[in-house]
Image (cartoon, grey):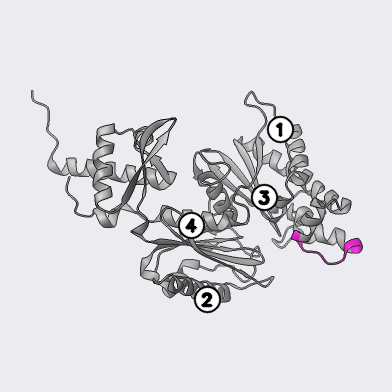
Amino acid sequence: MAKDRATPGSQTSLREANRARIVSAVQQRGSITQVELAGATGLSAATISNIVKELTGAGVLHTSPTSRSGRRAQEVTLARNLGLVAGVHFGERSLRVALADVTLRVVAEQRLPLPPEHRADAGLDQVAMLVEEMLESLGTGPSEVLALGVGVPAPVDVVTGQVSAAGILRGWDGTVVPDVLEQRLGVRVVVDNDANLGALAEVRLGVARGLTHVAYLRVSHGVGLGLVLDGRVYHGRSGGAGELGHLVVNPDGPPCRCGNRGCLETSVGAAELLGRLRPTHGHLTLRDVVTRAQEGDQACRDVVADAGRQLGEAAATVCTLLDPQMVVVGGDLALAGEILLEPLRDVLDAKTVPSTAGPVAVEMSMLGAQAEVRGALVLALDTYDIGAPRLLGAGS
């Protein structure tokens, strides 16, 4: 009995699926050789070659000669002329906005200070105006923006884009961020917690590149945790996963902004650290503490090291539960480097179960202050289907 032949429709669908796999792999890696594409997609070298040639002709991909391990190869990237993505990070005290092409090369960036309890309406209006001004300076407009990613220091329901926890980011409770920015700019907007975006950026572009199980600990005015598990950001039920700063470590401790008492943030957040130093050092910023610690100020070193030990205790709980390959530490306090990381590692190693894989690696963020806004750019790029608009109706 003769085998059933695939219909033209099924062949077309298969080819479209193969195109999508190739574009997605390039999107995920940033740059990749055709040989590596075969490994990443499971497609044959001939199929890879044909589709890459087709997508290059369609203006979706770009190829250039390179060498890997002494051998010539064809490097494949997304074509830069596909458009722009925008990224926004609302920090506790500052706002960062970046524009990048689809290779995630930043082409414009702005940073502005924010008042301590900035409100959503004013902040989002400021973002819309800033994005429009930055686009105008590049000689383009919102129609060239494929998507805009936003990071905020609070739990976010990523399905709706709504800030999903009350009290953690005052003035933002219940705000549906896309409703505001999409109406103002006319582009697709996606939102996530800023620590999640820091984790995403470090896995895709930074010190944890290529790893699939990573915990990103963001320590600044507050404490946040972003989790990448099995290669994907983990959000939980409504975006509340990873709120490590609101883990109660001392039930009799001081009140926390979340409504509980004795949360980790009340022990290692900026307010507590600066308060401990105020009697002897006067009014400092967190950056001042880091700088003085690096310059040898013993009181500042002691405060930073003690924060490292307490963060090590919390990180040990995370590692015992989730067994990540790496803990990446970012945020303003991470700039203290080994003054913070060494005691953190010591406590983490002492409080976790020994493994044949060795101790969990603890590394300082490679992307530093840009981690969260770069994660917002990655989120925007991942949201947009690069191949679909130009491949619509393409032949098999």
- In three-dimensional space, the C-alpha distance between marks 1 and 3, rounded to whole angstroms, equals 17 Å
Gap in angstroms between the C-alphas marked 3 and 4:
24 Å
Read off the residue under disc 3.
Answer: 244
| Discs 2, 4 touching: Cβ within 8 Å | no
| Amino acid type assigned to the residue bearing label 2 in the image | Asp
Q: Secondary structure at mark 2?
A: helix
Residue on which the image places disc 2? 125
The crowd level at tag 4 (other Cα within 10 Å; few <14, some 14-19, many 20+) is: many
Please tell me whether mark 3 sits on a helix, a strand or a loop.
helix
Residue 208, image x, y percentages: 56, 41
Displayed quadrant of residue 65: top left
SS label for mark 1: loop
**Sequence-first tag of 2 and 4:** 2
In the image: residue 256, left or right of residue 380: right
Residue most toward the right? 280
Q: Amino acid at mark 4?
A: Leu
**According to the image, label 1 marks what residue?**
352
Frontmost of labels 4 and 1 is 4
Of pointers 2 and 1, the one earlier in the residue sequence = 2
Query: Which region of the structure is painted magenta?
Result: 279-287
Q: Which residue is mark 4?
A: 377
Distance from label 4 to label 1 (Cα)?
Answer: 34 Å
Residue 269 is labelled as: none
Q: In the image, what residue type sits under mark 3?
A: Leu
Q: Quadrant of the N terminus?
A: top left
Position of 119 relative to 260 (above/below): below
Residue sitting at x 19%, y 51%: 394
Q: CA distance from mark 2 to mark 1?
A: 46 Å
Residue 370 picture location, percent across and down: 58, 56
Dot 1 amino acid type: Thr
Query: Quick check: can you spot residue 117?
Result: yes
Mark 2 and mark 4: Cα distance apart in space: 19 Å
